[in-house]
Image (spheres, rainbow, N blue to C red):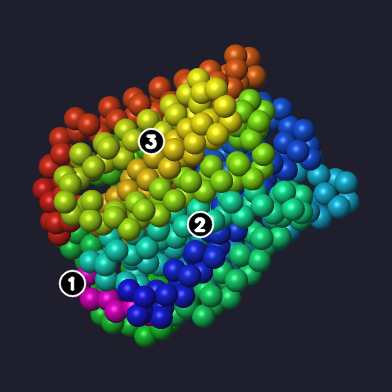
Amino acid sequence: MLKDSSFRNLWTAQTVSLFGTQASVVIIPLLALDTLDASAFEMGLLGSAESLAVLLLGLWVGMTADRYPRRSVMVTANILRLLLIGLIPVAYALDMLSIPVLFVAVFLVGALTLLYDSALSSHVVMTFDRRQLPKINSYMEGSTAVSEVAGPGLGGILVQALGAPLALLADLCSYVASTVLLLRSGGGGKKGTAGASRADAGQAGTGQGDTRQEVPDQEDSVEAEKEDAGEAGAEQESVKGALSGFTWAFSHPVLRPVIVSAAHFNFFTAMFFAVYTFYVVKELGFSPLLVGLASAAGGLGGVLSATAASSFMSKVRTRLLYVLSLVVPTVGAFLVPGSELLDSSLPQFLSVAAGMFLWSFAIVVNLVMSETIKQMVTPAHMIGQVTSAMRFTTLGFEPVGAIVGGTVSQFLSPTAALVIAACGLATSIAWVAFNRHLGTYDVNEEETPVGAT
């Protein structure tokens, strides 16, 4: 894949952007804690901001991503995210920074990140042979994992050295570099009917089968997009266009349990991580550097997982692997509050770091599987809409989870909130463990009978 300059530039742009974003995952909560002295409840509210953007704007964002040239959408999203993150240190310098200001900035960045991700997923499908999707998604999730190793550690070091407001400059630089690389990437890639999705191949009677041939480097032309996506998708009415991805996703017998289990899992994930930073800083006494190193341990697990994800998918049955990808993070989650049972700071740090390692290792496999399943079963012209519909559902419950986490932490204790969240994570497997459609589905086969919807 790296011999393809189009993919290489696209992948590098994504990787660079993720590095800055992962640094901010540590920097912004530490900014709220150290500079604004945020309470546990305020941390929960701040943790809900990004997913609240998905809940309120998700369906519209997916329609927008499918309506305009994908690469242009990604470039625009990068530039706007750069401006929003840049406003935070400016507000600090003007003594105008507050929790509401941070909330609005994170909310808008969350909406733009969804726009970017929806366009990216669709761009990948329309640019490259679908038989390469497991490998492409492994590269992309590998980038996420690598950024989770270096990004949080870098963020912790920068906060320690410069203070949180100035540390955000790392995120600004990453968006600049990512934008330049996106502009250099072409629409490239060779496409043909052999790479068509199962969904496109199965559009009997609709005239929407994937008959695309190799095309010139014109992904940014509206005409090329319309030819690829189909005139019908481009002419949908706004509301119908926004809801069509939602309808498609929930009518598919394999996507449906994947989406519901992810929504369940993410509710308790949001509850967990709304409290996590407050817990390790206030209860365990972690320094910014230790917070970053614990997150980096999680990223290391993701890196190792990304190198093996496609191999796991080819050797382990789809349903079993998906269930395991939900069970292992639950074990990791219990290791975090379990660190309180240890009697010194080093074992406590190792317990938290091990928990983050296990969590990320399994979640990378889960994300590669989910993304590949979605791309393989969804018609090409609906990828952006389905991506946003899935994000809307799977992330839409996160604001509630984050607020619940902050509330439980405030009125009971941070430890209680983490334990309750870990128990909730364990129950997410119920949606997929006994699902017969997922049980007969094989992500590696071109056609897998999954039964009626």
Q: CA distance from mark 2 to mark 3?
A: 19 Å
- Displayed quadrant of residue 99: top right
Q: Which residue is mark 1?
A: 194
Quick check: 258 left or right of 195?
right
Assess whether residue 288 is covered by the magenta stretch: no
Q: Residue at x 26, y 36 (%)?
A: 323
Number of residues whose C-alpha sits closer than 10 Å to that of mark 3, classed few (under 14), some (14–19) or many (20 or more): many
Q: Judge whether 271 appears above or below 395 on screen.
A: above
Residue type at mark 2 is Ser
Q: Judge whether 271 appears above or below 228 on screen.
A: above
Q: Which residue is mark 3?
A: 329
Q: Secondary structure at mark 3?
A: helix
For the record, the magenta segment spans: 188-195
Q: Looking at the rendered structure, which numbered label has been put on residue 147?
A: 2
Q: Position of residue 94 (x, y in %)?
A: 88, 51
Q: Please identify, in this view, whether the residue under mark 1 or under mark 3 is nearer the observer.
A: 3
Q: Please identify, in this view, whether the residue under mark 2 or under mark 1 is nearer the observer.
A: 2
Q: Nearer the viewer, residue 234 or 81?
A: 81
